Image (spheres, helix red, strand yellow):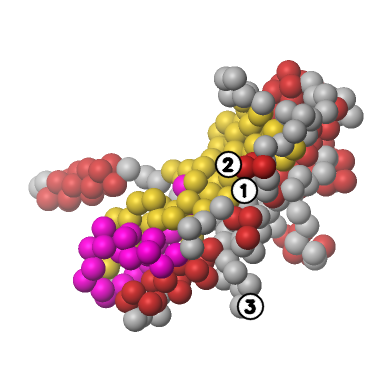
């Protein structure tokens, strides 16, 4: 069996998220169906991140196993011919059998778009949060930095719906970088965050909290206390999904793995 890696971009506005759901349009469901039509095999595409309904992606990663002899380039062309225009296979490549898009991911980068202009352009409808009212962007930027490092994100994640399950969940997450960016000559601000992994709604709840900081309802100095309280009612609201994009995923460098394997083999062979 061959292992095929996909880098996928999609407009999530018309889909019920990544994960397959019977009776609902999903990204995984569309790609599975297209791959099955091409190969006549029961293909399941495993995704790196289960993005929610309405969330977009520029660099989602998935993989599937197949006995097909089609080249990666042929798979890319065939999949894009069958998929709706709102889903594109950006790159397609054959990888080693041990590659797994979800379990090997070392980091994820998300971006949340907030449009600050008075009138939201129609092309950005369902692709950015429109917030034209005053915000203290400097305070938001200072607060964003306080999410970096390892923290208990109980206050910034959705409940599982079960108190017992919530009590047993590992809520510690490591954030590598967290910042507010205003692109040059733009009416937008972006929240960009890169971390090892994320809890459900975590990024959207952080953005809601940063907007509350921008409004003056919270201050940057409140963030450490909200972490300590482990109470999601003390953080800001969960903002809508349309402004959220999965930008990229980080994986180990395959050449590093090959070099390490070669080094181990040389060590074993030495007398």
Relative vertical location of residue 152 with respect to residue 62 in this rendering, above or below: above
Q: Is residue 8 left or right of residue 20?
A: left
Mark 2 to mark 1: distance in Å? Answer: 10 Å
172 falls in the magenta region: no
Compared to residue 232, the image places residue 120 above or below, namely above
Rendered residue at 41%/67% (across/down): 82
Q: Residue at x 44, y 55 (%)?
A: 88
Which of the 4 quarters of the picture holds residue 161? bottom right
Point out which mark residue 23 bears.
Answer: 3
Q: Which residue is mark 2?
A: 110
Mark 1 element type: loop
Magenta extent? 59-83
Task: Report the number of discs.
Answer: 3
For label 3, count other residues whose C-alpha is less than 10 Å away and answer few (under 14), some (14-19) or many (20+). Answer: few
**Which circle, 1 or 3, is nearer the viewer?**
3
Give the mark nearer the N terminus: 2 vs 1. 2
**10 Å crowding of disc 2: few (<14), some (14-19), many (20+):** many
Residue 166 visible in the current orientation: yes
* CB under 8 Å between discs 2 and 1: yes
């Amino acid at each position: 069996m061959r292992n095929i890696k996909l880098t996928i971009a999609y407009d999530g506005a018309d889909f019920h998220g990544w994960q397959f759901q019977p009776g609902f349009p999903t990204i995984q469901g569309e790609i599975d169906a297209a791959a099955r039509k091409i190969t006549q095999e029961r293909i399941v595409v495993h995704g790196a991140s289960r993005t929610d309904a309405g969330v977009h992606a520029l660099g989602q990663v998935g993989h599937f196993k197949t006995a097909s002899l089609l080249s990666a380039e042929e798979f890319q062309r065939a999949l894009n011919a069958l998929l709706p225009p709102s889903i594109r296979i950006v790159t397609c490549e054959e990888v080693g059998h041990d590659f797994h898009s979800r379990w090997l991911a070392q980091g994820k980068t998300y971006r949340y778009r907030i449009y600050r202009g008075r009138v939201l352009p129609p092309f950005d409808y369902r692709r950015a949060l429109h917030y034209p009212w005053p915000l203290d962007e400097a305070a938001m930027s200072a607060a964003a930095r306080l999410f970096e490092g390892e923290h208990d994100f109980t206050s910034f994640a959705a409940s599982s719906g079960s108190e017992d399950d919530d009590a047993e969940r590992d809520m510690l997450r490591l954030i590598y970088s967290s910042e507010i960016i205003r692109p040059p000559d733009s009416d937008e601000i972006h929240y960009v965050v890169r971390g090892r992994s994320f809890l459900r709604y975590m990024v959207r709840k952080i953005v809601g909290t940063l907007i509350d900081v921008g409004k003056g309802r919270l201050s940057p100095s409140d963030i450490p206390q909200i972490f300590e309280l482990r109470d999601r009612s003390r953080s800001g609201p969960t903002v809508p999904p349309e402004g959220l994009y999965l930008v990229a995923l980080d994986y180990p460098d395959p050449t590093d793995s090959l070099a390490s394997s070669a080094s181990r083999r040389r060590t074993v062979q030495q007398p």
